[in-house]
Image (spheres, rainbow, N blue to C red):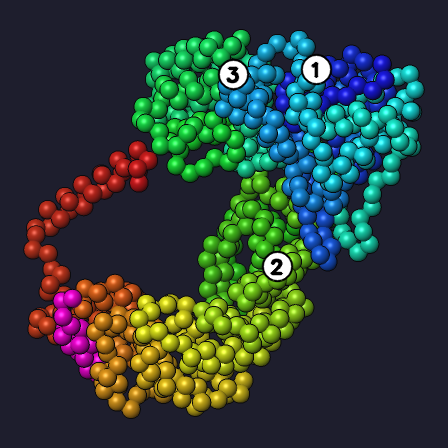
Amino acid sequence: MGVVFLGVRHHSPACARLAAETIHAVRPAYVLVEGPADMNDRMDELLLGHDLPIAVHTGYRDHERRHSSWTPLCDYSPEWAALTAGRATGAELRFIDLPAWHPALADLANRYADARHDEAAGKLCRAFEVDNVDALWDHLFEVPPADGLAGRLATYFDLVRGDAQAGPDDAAREAYMAQWVRAAAWEAGERPVVVVTGGFHRPALIRLATRGERTWPKVPEPPEGAVAGSHLVPYAFRRLDAFDGYQAGMPSPGYYQDLWEHGVDGAAHRLVEAVTARLRSRRQPVSTADLIAARAAADALALLRGHPHPARVDVLDGLAGALVGEALDTPLPWASPGRLQAGHHPVVVEMIAALSGDRTGRLHPSTPLPPLVRAVLAELGGPGDERLHLGDPADRERSRFLHRLRVLGIPGVVRSASGLRVEQWTLTDTDDRMPALIEAGSYGVDPQEAAASVLAERIRDADLGRLTDVLFDAALCGIGELAGRVLNDLERAIGAAADLGALGRTLAVALGMWRHDDLFAITSGAVVRAAALRVLWLAEGVRGGSVPADPRRIDAMAAVRDALRHAGTQLGLDVDAALGVADRVAACQDAPPDLRGASLGLTWSLRGTAADPVRAVRGAFVPKSAGDWLAGLFALAREEVLHTGGMLELLDELVGAMTDQDFLVALPALRQAFGYFPPRERHLIATRLVELRSGRSARDLLRLDAPPELVAAGMALDERVDTALRREGLL
């Protein structure tokens, strides 16, 4: 019989059945499957008895690039069906594709991507009058009887490939796979060999299998200095779903699992049940009459489209017609491939979720795990809340461990609250944690090494803001060596920075670390000094009097104030020179009003009192830009304004003298400006102004002239309304 080439679509139940039936029928010497050849010596691990879906995750990193990719397998994947059928019939099993880290697969996050069929498949969709490739595939292969399936698949993939020349990456992969085929055919002698690959590769492999070397190819090794590794990870249907952004194969994995287990008609029934159950669980009314109408519509559509049983789109169209009464603003999502977009009707969204299914894979307990997983699970502990006092060495080390997991993106590890020296963490169990830990294992063997690798990767080509983020995360993770490297990079970046907002944030972060070096153990004084000087130098050159208040620019001036106040003497900052810069900016009418106000606030807060604060405020107040100017002033000298005698009265006078037009123009900025006062201080301001304007106590104005019984009845009514809204899911 020689070599049997089966071209398949990844995650197709029809192809999976064909692969298994063919292998059981011909009982080949070798079963060759498109997949990572570096997993061949771990085939027993792959077939331990996992609960699918699972995936082979491959991580790679060197000094130039990092790459992660997945090779997913579910019950109805043709590759999985071929491997299990081959093992059952005693065949030798081999993956025959290049390792996932290889440059030929560098652009693929998912080995089983099906993105090369657009032109030919588009012509077929038009010929068969279907919306997209998924509907075409069901129409040609999943719904019809299995008779003649192999021939139809071969014709389809010959049309898809056509005369197209493979690109360099596909050519390299096909040449490598072909050498495996030739070697297996030579070794098998008179016994057959079955080759299961993506249908796009089948025509090329048939051509290449007749010429070339017949020796077994070597599995490529990673370049010197590179780190590469593959591990099995649990996968989930929601990650496998094209509507969730998955690059390859079939959408709606929950539906196709039912198709694999129960056939076309059974899958249609179960889809209706799943959609109904999901909608009813969301308190969406679905009546028996609706379901009868949906089923009747699906049967009619299947008959009209020539389907012996309702296909996926027949059932979906029937459900949409029966359950969605309004006109839809966007096309139904199953009419076009790709990720589910915003704007779809809520019922349609729930239908897509029901199609996806909620199955999550489980690895066999004997599956080898990366060292990182063992290290984390030994230290993480169970779910619950943890309150950590960072002054305590044990709590500080625990905080660093949890921050390392946060940097690695491990689900279920959340810092729910943080203060200066106290953190609150919430740990929860989640199905996503194990896959994330296994995938993070490609970064290092323990949390510190892995987090350091992640942060080091972020440094490359990072701007000032990203460098600041990396510095802070490195400090929180206790990775001092990396933090020292980032500090050096920050000093260089500060010298060229032109964004006051980014500089201010860098200054605030570095100053906080300098002030609390007992917690962070980071020497950031040089960055503090460089950033403070750069902010002052840039601030004096900013022009543009009509620019609205910029909170980031104001925060930069606040960071300079704090640096001068807390670190000026120790770090050699010239406080008098800095105050001179602030005086000049405050008096410059061409400077933005928020920057002028912030500069006045800086001098006022550092000197303790202005020479004449009333005159300074009166002279700087301009009605049309009052709100922006006050925003800068309040941000840096809030307490001085609040507690300087006569200042609130002056501001009330100045605002009261504004024309109606000026007040309406300035009102949004004024609201923003007074937002710098916390609620307690806003209450104090309101109280003093009420007393100033009315001569009455503000407390008197808050008294309610109503019987207590009426107030109690109103509160009880409010509570009943809130209870009803919560019960109906509206609150």
1 or 2: tag closer to the N-terminus:
1
Tell me, yes or no, whether the highlighted magenta stretch contains residue 211. Answer: no
Residue 663, located in which quarter of the rendered image? bottom left
Residue 584 lies, in percent from the top left, at 37, 86
105, above or below 541, in the image? above
Tag in front: 1 or 2: 1
Q: Residue at x 58, y 50 (%)?
A: 409
Q: Is residue 456 left or right of residue 420?
A: right
Q: Give the structural element (helix, strand or loop) at label 3.
A: loop
Q: Residue at x 50, y 81 (%)?
A: 533
How packed is label 1: few (under 14 Cα within 10 Å), some, or many (20 or more)? Answer: many
Residue 720 lies, in percent from the top left, at 22, 38
Tell me, yes or no, whether the highlighted magenta stretch contains residue 658. Answer: yes
Tag in front: 3 or 1: 1
Residue in front for this viewpoint, 487 or 543: 543
140, above or below 495, in the image? above
504, above or below 609, in the image? above
459, above or below 636, in the image? above
Amino acid type for the residue under numbered disc 1: Ala
Mark 3 vs 1: CB contact within 8 A: no
Residue 447, located in which quarter of the rendered image? bottom right
Tag in front: 3 or 2: 3
- Most prominent secondary structure in the magenta stretch? helix
Q: Is residue 598 left or right of residue 94?
A: left
Total marks placed: 3
Region in magenta:
644-661
Q: Give the structural element (helix, strand or loop) at label 2.
A: helix
Residue 516 showing in the rendered view: no
Residue occupied by mark 2: 458
Residue occupied by mark 3: 311
Residue in front for this viewpoint, 677 or 198: 198
